[in-house]
């Protein structure tokens, strides 16, 4: 008796949570460049396809699934979403990094780099906090009280996470290319955050390479 397999293929980054992405990355590291294992791991985590099912799929079906995934996974220039909604509550990205509270500043710089890893949800919980007031594009967020809601960000789509990371990517590029030399001398960022951005340069480049590599497989 044939068993029907239902496969749900995500169409964009919003359908992939941070938790799912971290689990995927953990398993991908174990398989390296082994093509068949790579594809099986990708389909298992993102589409719910059990490894033993892959050999039962028609070639055309498998190619279509890969095409759908790679059509968006190679996109690496997602915009920062300044306001997001989690469980019906609106959260705003830190509206003024130069006036970030000292406690928030300390909770970001203690990780020494900015990358999407097991600490990323904590960084997001610092940067995004519930709105207290909103008027058009202007808004205020709750005062920082310490990292309290990091687990919520594990269930937020990767479109939000990549957007936040690439905000720092572009800032780093501007700094490194001397396009915004005045920013380095201004009060826009804490001095240590500038240093962290510079130290994170190679790690952030790896994020670019990861997305480009995925789309080319």
Image (spheres, rainbow, N blue to C red):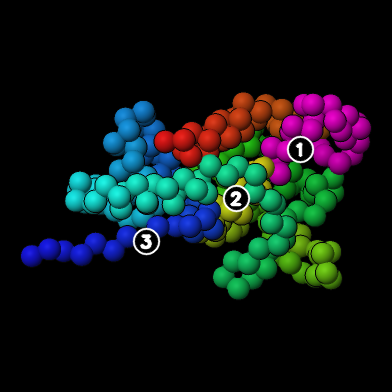
Percent x, y of residue 122: 59, 49
Q: CA distance from mark 3 to mark 1?
A: 36 Å
Q: Circle 2 sits in a helix, a strand or a loop, which is it?
A: helix
Give me the disc on residue 171. 1
Q: Residue at x 70, y 52 (%)?
A: 80
Up-down relation of residue 144 to residue 77 (above or below): below
Give me the disc on residue 161. 2
What kind of secondary structure does the magenta stretch mostly adopt?
Answer: helix
Q: Which image quadrant: the C terminus?
A: top left
Looking at marks 2 and 1 on the same chain, the residue that comes earlier in the sequence is marked by 2
Label 3 sits on residue: 8
Q: CA distance from mark 2 to mark 1?
A: 16 Å
Q: Nearer the viewer, mark 3 or mark 2?
A: 3
Give the residues in magenta: 167-190
Percent x, y of residue 205: 61, 30
Q: Is residue 80 visible?
A: yes
């Amino acid at each position: 008796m044939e068993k029907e397999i239902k496969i749900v293929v995500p169409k964009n980054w919003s359908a992939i949570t941070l938790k799912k992405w971290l689990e995927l990355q953990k398993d991908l590291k174990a398989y390296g460049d082994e093509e068949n294992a790579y594809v099986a791991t990708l389909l298992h985590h993102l589409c719910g396809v059990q490894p033993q099912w892959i050999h039962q799929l028609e070639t055309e079906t498998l190619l279509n699934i890969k095409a759908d995934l790679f059509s968006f996974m190679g996109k690496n220039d997602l915009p920062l979403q300044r306001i997001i909604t989690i469980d019906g509550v609106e959260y705003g990205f830190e509206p003024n990094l130069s006036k970030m509270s000292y406690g928030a500043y300390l909770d970001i710089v203690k990780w020494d780099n900015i990358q999407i890893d097991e600490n990323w949800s904590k960084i997001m919980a610092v940067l995004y906090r519930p709105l207290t007031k909103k008027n058009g594009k202007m808004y205020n967020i709750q005062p920082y009280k310490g990292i309290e809601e990091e687990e919520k960000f594990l269930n937020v789509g990767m479109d939000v996470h990549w957007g936040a990371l690439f905000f720092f990517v572009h800032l780093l590029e501007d700094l490194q290319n001397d396009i915004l030399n005045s920013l380095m001398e201004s009060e826009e960022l804490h001095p240590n955050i500038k240093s962290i951005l510079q130290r994170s340069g190679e790690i952030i480049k790896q994020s670019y390479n990861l997305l480009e590599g995925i789309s080319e497989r």
